[in-house]
Amino acid sequence: MSNNKNIFWDRMQNLDRRYIYIVVALAIIIPLLIPFNSKTYITEPVENLYKKVDSFTEREDRAILMCFMHDASTMPELFPMEVSILRHCFERNIKVFTICFLPTAAPLIDYAINTAKEVGGFDVQSGVDYCNFGYKPYALFLPILLGMGEDIAEAVETDSEGRKVENLEIMKNLKNYNELNLVIDFSASASVQTWITYARVKFGANIGAGITAVMAAENYPFLQTGQLVGMLGGLKGAAEYEKLVDVFASNNVVFSKEIVKETWIPITDKNIPYQFKTARIGMNAQSVAHIMIIVFIILGNIGYFVSRKSKNKELG
Amino acid sequence: MKRQIPLLIVIGLGLLFVVHTFVPHKISEDFYEWWQTWSKAISPFMVLLGIMSLFMVHSTKIKRKTANWQYSFVTLGGLLITAFVGFMWGTREGTPYMWLFKNIQMPMSATMFSLLAFYIASAAYKAFRARSVEATVLLLAAVIVMLGQVPLGAQISHWIPDTSKWILNVPNLASKRAITLGVGLGITATSLKILLGIERKYLGGD
């Protein structure tokens, strides 16, 4: 019996990795195809970013800049964040600008704006309610970042449609970071630290981050110092922001901790369009995948200890 | 001269930027504006250089029929087709460029990135062992943070997300800050070495 047990664990130790791949694939695909309701808990960095964005509601002299610093590979995590924040801005009449310094990010901006605008049915106009600065070569990242501290229109010059930025209606009452007071950087790298180093330190702009889960740990020191006003970390951060927009912004309600604690929005609710709950659906898959990985770790360790014990016995 | 002139440009401009950061004078501001105009003018040439380099590398591969040279056709074809549809019909929603982006670029990039999940699961099973005290601590921290990141963790017990938060806010933060400080000191030291002409490896050669 004991021998059979050892053979089993030895086999498990040398399990073909393709079996692991199949289990992981199923653990991800099934929850995506059959969504189930799970609760979304709001964390402080997400709450702070939401509140900062919300504080610009209806203000003519405040705007947000969203910097898309990633390509399509990290879209599953970052795209729902971008759509949620754009939706928040459109719901609450907040002026919003978008920019990117990677050519592969340019279509993502169009895609995110169109998703938020069309699925949400918002009557917003380019150049009036929002403005896409479009793609600027990476070599201009620092000159534009620093230049916006003096004069946005001079630093950026034209938007994605080739219009002079200074002539756009949205630019009324906006000059530099004093008004473009919140920059949110979406990336899978440490690019947000460049915004902190220059836009925050030199000009006092508020900086927020939307970042992939693997990079989130890097930014905790900046959250603690207040150099980052808030952060959306991975799909979880995106799911939390989606919920906040559903509970507050789309119902024109001011943020309250009590309401958010008590409110539970089932993702199977047909009234919420699919595009506005992708992160929460994705969190189901992530939950199952995390559990699977934990089970793999436990199984691997049981096998390791059983094999070690039997080897020790053999050696006497 | 091939090394001296670039060295002088780097040292001269580097020192000017240091002065600009610390001296808010009119001349310093003018210099900064002058640099901004120049950097805008230079950037399109960098894109051109990149395209030329890509063409040279892949055309050489095709000519010499090196390993996997067939893929170079795909790279060059992709570049030409994407550029052509972009110039012809623009890059906005509803254009062929956007169709290519949504139906080729997006799924391919996402597929590559999603492979990470499979590798992590496989590595967790095959290599994540409690071989020592340190490895056990790492393993426990990983399990708690993974559970704390998903709704199920909070449903099991509020201790899981609370402990996960503590791990991220205390030991993780302390180690990240130490690394950041170390990197910062390293950058300062390297910058000084470049400004003083001690560090010259970036010029190429030995």
Image (cartoon, rainbow, N blue to C red):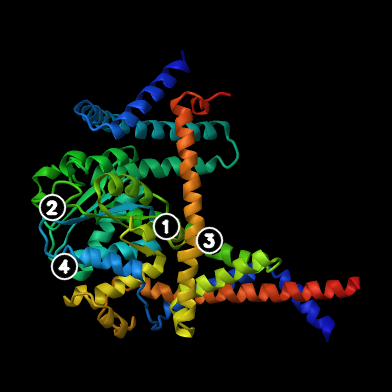
Subunit ID for the residue under disc 4: A
Same subunit, tags 4 and 3 = no
Q: Residue furthest right?
A: A316
Q: Pointer 4: what residue?
A: A92
Residue B114 seen in this snapshot: no
Res. A270 image quadrant: bottom left
Subunit ID for the residue under disc 3: B
Position of residue A60 in the picture relative to residue A272 (left or right): left
Q: What is the crowding at mark 2: few (fewer than 14 residues within 10 Å), some, or many (at least 20)?
A: many
Position of residue B2 in the picture relative to residue A152 (left or right): right
**Labels 2 and 1: the sequence-earlier one:** 2
Same subunit, tags 1 and 4 = yes
Label 1: which secondary element: helix
Label 3: which secondary element: helix
Same subunit, tags 1 and 3 = no
Residue drawn at 84 percent across, 81 percent down: A3
Q: Pointer 2: what residue?
A: A127
Disc 2 and disc 1: Cα gap in Å? 37 Å
Q: Amino acid at mark 2?
A: Gly
Q: Please tell me which residue lies in front, A231 or B51.
A: A231
Residue drawn at 53 percent across, 35 percent down: B62
Q: Please tell me which residue lies in front, B41 or B137.
A: B137
Subunit ID for the residue under disc 1: A
Q: Amino acid at mark 1?
A: Pro
Residue drawn at 91 percent across, 73 percent down: A316
Q: Pointer 3: what residue?
A: B116
Q: What is the crowding at mark 3: few (fewer than 14 residues within 10 Å), some, or many (at least 20)?
A: few
Quarter of the image that includes the N terminus of chain A: bottom right
